[in-house]
């Protein structure tokens, strides 16, 4: 797919990686397992969302989304919950859709900013 991936062994490590990237983080998407040692995927999403409110997330879980609804309250940028075992094609589709949407949003933002700058001159 042409995507660079950074792997963390658990949620605490993933959060540390995100934090160390600074405000101009290079990440476009976080994919996390639901149940991990030291910090659940849901806790990772909630804690990292406070630092990076525009960063989207995919959560992989053995539970159905219906069983997770109460736990997922506050996971505003959770774009998909995928049931394990993951199907490669579905994961690719979700990644592509999320990244495409982010790129089009960025392009629209840049387009608006450029138009505003031109008008301001």
Image (cartoon, grey):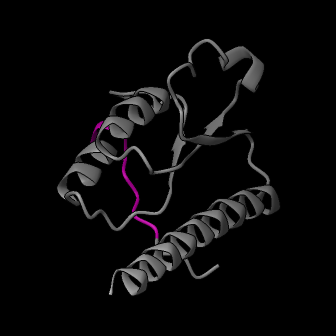
Q: Residue at x 79, y 53 (%)?
A: 87
Q: Residue at x 46, y 68 (%)?
A: 5
Residue 21, x across and y down, in percent: 23, 60
Q: Is residue 50 above or below residue 86?
A: above
Q: Is residue 99 left or right of residue 66?
A: left
Q: Is residue 31 above or below residue 5?
A: above
Q: Quadrant of residue 61?
A: top right
| Most common SS among magenta residues | loop
Q: Give the quarter of the figure containing the N terminus.
A: bottom right
Residue 103, x across and y down, in percent: 57, 72
Q: Give the quarter of the figure containing the C terminus.
A: bottom left
Q: Is residue 43 left or right of residue 104?
A: left
Q: Residue at x 69, y 67 (%)?
A: 96
Q: Quadrant of residue 63?
A: top right
Q: Residue at x 41, y 30 (%)?
A: 46
Residue 79, x across and y down, in percent: 64, 44
Q: Which residues are magenta?
A: 5-12
Residue 33, x across and y down, in percent: 54, 39
Residue most extreme to the top? 70
Of residues 90 and 111, the one nearer the viewer is 111
Q: Is residue 115 left or right of residue 88?
A: left
Q: Is residue 22 left or right of residue 46?
A: left
Residue 39 is inside the magenta segment: no
């Amino acid at each position: 797919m042409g995507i660079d991936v950074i792997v963390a062994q658990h949620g605490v490590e993933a959060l540390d990686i995100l934090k160390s990237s600074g405000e101009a983080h290079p990440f476009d998407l976080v994919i996390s397992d639901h149940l991990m040692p030291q910090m659940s995927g849901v806790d990772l999403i909630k804690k990292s969302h406070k630092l990076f409110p525009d960063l989207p997330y995919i959560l992989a879980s053995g539970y159905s989304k219906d069983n997770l609804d109460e736990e997922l309250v506050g996971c505003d940028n959770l774009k998909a919950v995928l049931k394990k075992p993951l199907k490669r094609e579905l994961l690719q589709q979700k990644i592509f859709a999320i990244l495409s949407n982010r790129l089009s949003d960025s392009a629209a933002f840049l387009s608006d900013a450029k138009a505003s700058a031109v008008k301001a001159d």
